[in-house]
Image: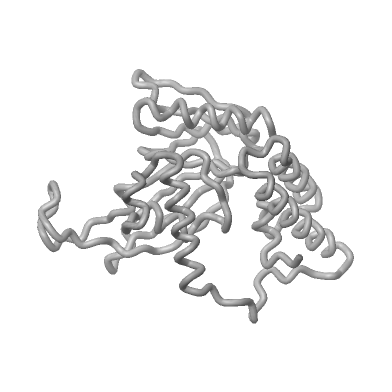
Amino acid sequence: MTIIDPYSTLEVSRHATDADIERAYERLLKLFDPEWYPGSTEDAHRRLEEVNAAYAQLRGRACGEGVESEPEDSEPVHEGDADGRRAAVADNLVRVGFIPGDARRQSNPAVDVLTTLLPPGAEIAVCLTCLGVKSTGQYECRERSDSFSATTVMRHDGPYATGDYVHAIKRSEIVLCTEGELSWTVSRYAGQRTDRVTLYSIPFHDILGASVRGRKRDVVEVWIADGPTVAVQTRPREADALRECLERAATTR
């Protein structure tokens, strides 16, 4: 099996050291252990096969074999593939309760963003509305960005008049956990009726733990191995779900 982007499969940067790759490989072997993996056994074995293949390719670079991470003649993404990926993301969001089941086939800003910015095949464990993220120190998050069209209000919608352009992404910023990362989106208006959205991510192996604070229990403080504390504000009563997911990840990393 040849992996087109082994770095993405192992969830490491293209500048990762051999030690970084080893740690990522060992973490993913534990994560996809069929005995503990929350998904199906078949899915666990498939993911282990991909992880092993990616690891073999990256190990091969030390022997001068090289890694073709983005070949120029790679297969294009077909429209049907994109539709299937979008449907998979929507099903994930229905499963975790972020969108209702009857809305999975409707246009949704969160689905559009995650279809574009999440790594292929990422399973969503928790997805919540994000009201803001602050940090007490510096941490170099992974970043993935893209541009999305703003929407036109077709009828009077709260403060917006018919024909106004509103930024649907801004009203749907999210914080989520996949099988390997804590992520959140930040958006800004980029002009030309587009929003620029960035997905920031922290690997679970850098997270030491989390706690919930605040009068309404809606701020999750996440302790990072390098020192800073990331404070994620969600809607009231959603913070516990995020904390529990982070705590499980921190204790099994």
Q: Position of residue 87 (x, y in %)?
A: 44, 58
Relative to 244, say whether 36 is above or below: below
Relative to 167, say whether 131 is above or below: above
How many circles with numbers are drawn on the protein? Answer: 0
Left or right: 165, with 148 as reference point: left
Q: Nearer the viewer, residue 136 or 252?
A: 252
Q: Position of residue 140 (x, y in %)?
A: 58, 46
Relative to 77, say whether 130 is above or below: above
User: Which residue is outermost to the top?
Assistant: 215
Q: Nearer the viewer, residue 126 or 95?
A: 95
Identify the image quadrant of the C terminus. Answer: top right
Q: Position of residue 1 (x, y in %)?
A: 76, 65
Location of residue 194 by image quarter: bottom left
Q: Position of residue 193 (x, y in %)?
A: 27, 66
Q: Nearer the viewer, residue 94 or 144?
A: 94
Relative to 156, say whether 234 is above or below: above
Left or right: 226, with 232 as reference point: right
- Residue at point 32%, 51% (across, down): 103
Location of residue 16 by image quarter: bottom right
- Residue at point 50%, 48% (across, down): 200
Location of residue 49 by image quarter: bottom right
Left or right: 191, with 98 as reference point: left
- Residue at point 13%, 63% (across, down): 163
User: Which residue is outermost to the bottom?
Assistant: 73
